[in-house]
Image: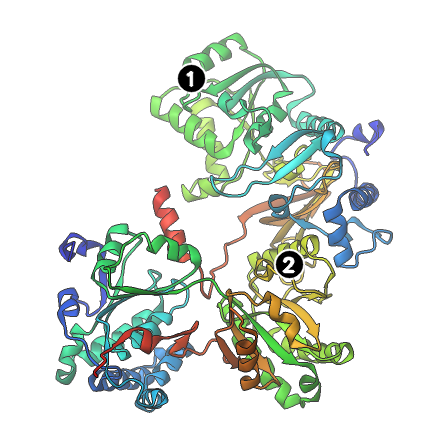
Amino acid sequence: MLTEEELNIPPYSLSKDEKRTFLTKHLVALTRQHYEHCAEYKKILNAISFDINNISDYSQIPFLPVRLFKEYELKSVPTESVVKTLTSSGTTGQKVSKIFLDKSTSAMQSKVLTKIVSSCLGKQRVPMLILDSSAVIKNRAMFSARGAGILGFSIFGTDRLYALDDEMNLNVDAIKAFLEKHQGETIFLFGFTFMIWLHFYKELKKLSVKLDLSKGVLIHGGGWKKLVNEAVSPEMFKLALHEVCGINRVYDYYGMVEQTGSIYVECECGHLHTSIFSDIICRRPKDFSECEWGEEGLVEVVSVLPESYPGHVLLTEDVGVVLGEDDCPCGRKGKYFRINGRIKNAEIRGCSDTYAAEASNAARV
Amino acid sequence: MPQEFSAIQNEVKFLFPTLGNIDGVANHRSFAPFDGLVCAFLNEVSKKLLADNEAKAYPDVVTFAFFCRKANIEQIKNTYDGRLHGRLGRGVTFHIAPSNVPINFAYTLVAGLLAGNRCVVRASSKDFAQTRIVCKAFCSVAKKPEYEDVKNFFSVVMFNHSAKVMDFFSSICDVRVIWGGDNTIVEIRKSPLQPRATEITFADRYSFAVFDAKYVTLMNDDEMKKVAQAFYNDTYLYDQNACSSPRLIVWLGNKELCDKAKEKFWNAIYENISSKYSLAPILSVDKLTARYKCAVELDAMKIEQSQDNLITRIQLNSLPQNLNEYICAGGFYLEYDTENLANIVPVVTRKFQTLSYLGADAADLQNFVAQNGLSGIDRIVPVGKTADFAFVWDGYDLIETMSRMVSAV
């Protein structure tokens, strides 16, 4: 577990070797802990004859594919210690990931998120405009990824306003009143990339409403897949938002429900950054060896936070590129990288249920 | 006809004949299996394809062309040895080809025609070159005056998912042939058939192989290389996705022989595939997930070490009843060693389709299926032949199933 001192290390301050030692120490400890307390994890490591007593570097620790969290309820604590269950957002009918948090893991997630976010937002809590509907967080027993994200980030807001009503309509009057009330203050905006585009940017544009958010800081996440379909690039996204509300500071983040807290935030140079609490390794699909910097691969994510479930070393279904380490012009240490999107669904050859798939697609339209 | 074709014709695209011919197909008389004009037409199509430069780039089209040659069709006809006397096609057969195997539409069509039917085939809505090349040959041969009537024998159509179109073709057919997985069958069965119509469905199936360990250890290098290529054709050629691709390999022999044979066999496979098989990234993630699923759910198993993700092997010390839940595409093999084939009897369910063999005797294996009254295993073929199309498929004789017997006393 992270000590109070370790938590206080500035999140982008360790150099390559220091970070490697730090991560290896914690991730090895987590590997042992999950091996002892999670039966499924133990079976997996045994089946590949992995020796938990002989790990010299965290990159050697086996990664679990994130899909396993959809297949099994993986946890390393007794059920009665679970205080919160996070679920991934999946469309109806799909299996969702379930992530079990105990008190300690949940608290650590908040603390680390605070460290990371305050490095771009500042240490003070500020008024917060949530570019979503409060309907998303109404069911507190089962948090969706969207709800968990909103609640997680809400700790940075003093006065909070949901910009959208339950029907996802933009509440322009309430926003104007909110900005009036907090004139001159930094405003923290948070939301999901596609929702922001659809329900905030497009609405403002349509209504020809101009807001003054020149003192705003927007942190957004959730991925670009749907915006790529609309041919919106990250640059266009920033320009378009600037146009409707004058906002200058817009940061994308990469994160997933399986590793809440240790997120990867974009810097001023447009690069996603790893903090000391997490790391990215891109791997070649052919043999899972590590890619060179600049070479696209499957994204492995590691985090020192997951104590209550074996999610400290995961293989995602995203592809990305590590761009460098410790030398981003923004001055932050650690690896910086780019996410290129999801892995392409293989073109299936052979027999399969394609007519049924077409039917379900047709039904959705 | 409960519904008029005109109501749906805008949703249907005809690849053959390009102007459409539903009335002609619906009203033409039936013919006897292996009808002379049909066989002659297929032989012409075969010649056309074999002379087509574009077709040469597609081995599956070339294989189909060889299949349609007069000599081959004659040979198949001869295997029926008089059993077809008195038979006539059932009428109109409606075939729904799988979307992912380009050439399958052509084989199912040929089976329907040779059984004596007029056929409507729904080809994959994907834009496959193979579909285009084969239909081009059909059109070109049908232009000749002697094949004028062939335009009323069959149609190759494309249409997007539509209950109305599916309802229409289902309502005019005497036999519906569904190639596709369980979900596709459920979906299509929502469209009713005429009371006397029958249906042939190719549901989700899985296949396995039986290899004799001693036989493998005794093979010389050349033989081993040939077997490796044959195994490649059974598996990696279609990403191990075909229902006839082996998922489980049963090694017959004692432990020492099995270990030796496996090392030799997999080295040869690796040598064969390493430079030519490109594993899709999603499949390496799928395989990793499947590997760990086996680790979590199965007892007495071991994940074999491998140098990369091309060959994934799971050694099983006992066979689970739900074996089919542990399969994965892209080169994922469950392996089981035994000295007695009878040990697999309890797990061979109706989901098992093809048994491919190496160093075993086909007749012995056929007896094994019969003597044990197995509900699975419909085909027994040597390694390398799992994907070869034959008129007996999945336990159906397509010619007999799509024709009717006119009895006379």
In the image: residue A100, left or right of residue B49: right
Examine the image and state in which quarter residue B254 appears. Answer: bottom right
| Relative image position of residue A229 (x, y in whole percent) | 42, 44
Q: Are marks 2 and 1 in contact (CB under 8 Å)?
A: no
State whether residue B398 is above or below residue A259. below
Q: Where's the N terminus of chain B, which quadrant?
A: bottom left
Where is residue A24? Give x, y as percent: 81, 45
Q: CA distance from mark 2 to mark 1?
A: 46 Å
Give the residue type at disc 2: Arg
Image quadrant in which you'd find residue B397? bottom left
Quadrant (top left/top right/bottom left/bottom right) for the C terminus of chain B: bottom left
Residue drawn at the location 22% of the way across and 58% of the way down: B171
Query: Please, what is the three-letter code of the amino acid marked with disc 1?
Result: Asn
Residue B383 in view (yes/no):
no
Report the front residue among A331 and B47: B47
Residue that numbered label 2 is attached to: A284
Q: Position of residue A194 (x, y in %)?
A: 47, 34
Q: Residue at x 32, y 87 (%)?
A: B77
Chain ID, mark 1: A
Q: Which mark is residue A171?
A: 1
State whether residue B366 is above or below residue A223: below
- Of the numbered discs 2 and 1, the one sitting upstream in the chain is 1
**On screen, residue B335 above or below A98:** below
Q: Residue furthest front?
A: B409
In this picture the colour scheme is rainbow
